[in-house]
Amino acid sequence: MPGWEADKQLHSTYRSGKPDSSGYTQEQAAEVARYQADLLRLSIEVSTHPYWSTLDSGVVGARMALKHAHETAGDEAA
């Protein structure tokens, strides 16, 4: 990516900027591609796991129950 330098701000001598980026090495680009492929594979694996079909209230109901689980635990302790 090309570098940049911002305009001087009013009442300041400071100028922000970034130098030119050297970019990814071949090894870094390969590692990023591998991470992206792993993320896609794992996302599909989690979202299509058979567990989700076992929920009586569906995925949304289970998520809402998890969001409010701390309220139920707090009520029982009181």
Image (spheres, rainbow, N blue to C red):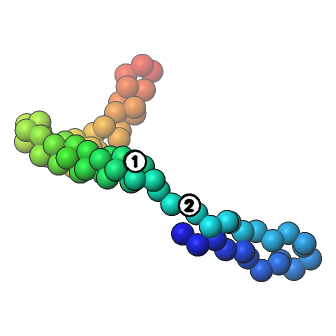
Tell me the CA gap for discs 1 and 2.
Answer: 14 Å
Q: What amino acid is labelled 2 in the image?
A: Ser
Q: Nearer the viewer, residue 47 or 16?
A: 16
Q: Position of residue 77 (x, y in %)?
A: 42, 19
Q: Can I make out residue 2 in this image?
A: yes
Query: Looking at the rendered structure, which numbered label has been put on residue 27?
Result: 1
* Residues under numbered marks 1 and 2 in contact, where contact means CB atoms less than 8 Å apart: no
Query: Looking at the rendered structure, which numbered label has been put on residue 60?
Result: none
- Does 45 appear above or below 4? above
Local secondary structure at mark 1: helix
Number of callouts: 2
- Residue drawn where x is 12% and y is 40% of the image: 49
For disc 1, the neighbor class at 10 Å (few under 14, some 14 to 19, many from 20) is few
Q: Is residue 43 left or right of residue 27?
A: left
Q: Position of residue 41 (x, y in %)?
A: 20, 47
Residue occupied by mark 2: 22
Q: Is residue 37 left or right of residue 6?
A: left
Q: First in sequence: mark 1 or mark 2?
A: 2
Local secondary structure at mark 2: loop
Query: Within the image, what quadrant is residue 11 found in?
Result: bottom right
- Residue drawn where x is 62% and y is 67% of the image: 20
